[in-house]
Amino acid sequence: MDLSPVSSSKPRVALLIDGDNFPRSELSQAESKAARLGEITIRRVFGDMTLHKDWAQETGCVAMHCTTSAGKNRADMALVIAAMDFLHRGLVSTFVIVSDDRDFDPLVSHLREQGCRVERIGKPALLPTATTKPQAKAKPPKGANKMLSKARALIAAAGSAGHPIQSLGVALHQQGIDIADTPQKSLRAWLMSYPGEFDCDPRGPKARVRLKT
């Protein structure tokens, strides 16, 4: 048995995934990009695993369950804490942050200031394409009517202030709707796939969604 230490000929890479933001179906693409930077020695995915059962399955990544409470998800904070821990213990020299969430920008800046290489991987292909033309209401795909009607009812009940996006996923889950069953795999991406139905605030812990009139 080879008990030699990990080779230092390649940079050691930490692959840190925001499972609430990035779909499980794109994991191989993220791993391929990270592997070009060195040897992936740490793989972590952070998210509410009750809402993302696909991430809770065997993926080769350590799934870090982060509960959602009072409309707030702790996944972002857990990812930041893990990155800082790996940095200060000197476990890796390269970080790959897999998320479109701009809340990670301060973390990326700090890691780079400490001399680490940091790369971001997002999911631009899953986001709606910008257009200057008026957008008609999207026709729901087959089988999506139930989720669409329940989401509309929950958002309408919240009134003009809108429904907090983070707690909307929990409310839908309680009604038997699993966002992981949708092609988008994340609630925000699903909402944004209906530009004629929903109006979402910019990303943030207090972001809300409203019905378009």
Image (spheres, rainbow, N blue to C red):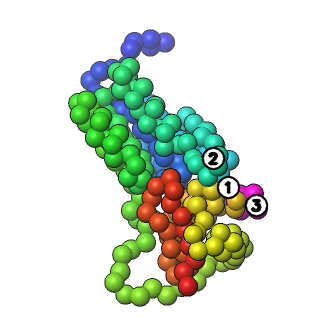
Q: Which quadrant is the C terminus positioned in?
A: bottom right
* Disc 1 to disc 2, C-alpha distance: 8 Å
The residue depicted at 23 percent of the width and 34 percent of the height is 113
Q: Which range is magenta?
A: 173-178
Q: Is residue 186 visible?
A: yes
Kindly state the secondary structure of the residue where label 3 is placed: loop
* Disc 1 to disc 3, C-alpha distance: 10 Å
Asked if the residue under mark 3 is in contact with the one under mark 1, i.e. CB atoms within 8 Å, the reply is no
Kindly state the secondary structure of the residue where label 2 is placed: strand
Query: How many numbered marks are there?
Result: 3
Residue under label 2, please give it: 68
Foreground pick, 60 / 211: 211
Q: Quick check: 142 left or right of 183?
A: right
> Label 3 is placed on what type of residue?
Gly
Would residue 4 be counted in the magenta stretch?
A: no
11 lies above or below 54: above
62 lies above or below 188: above
Asked if the residue under mark 2 is in contact with the one under mark 3, i.e. CB atoms within 8 Å, the reply is no
**Residue 176: which disc?**
3
Q: Quick check: 133 left or right of 151?
A: left
> Label 1 is placed on what type of residue?
Val
The residue depicted at 36 percent of the width and 75 percent of the height is 130
* Disc 3 to disc 2, C-alpha distance: 17 Å
Residue under label 1, please give it: 170
Answer few, some or many: residues within 10 Å of disc 1's Cα (few below 14, many 20 plus, some between 14 and 19): many
Q: Which of marks 3 and 2 is nearer the N terminus?
A: 2
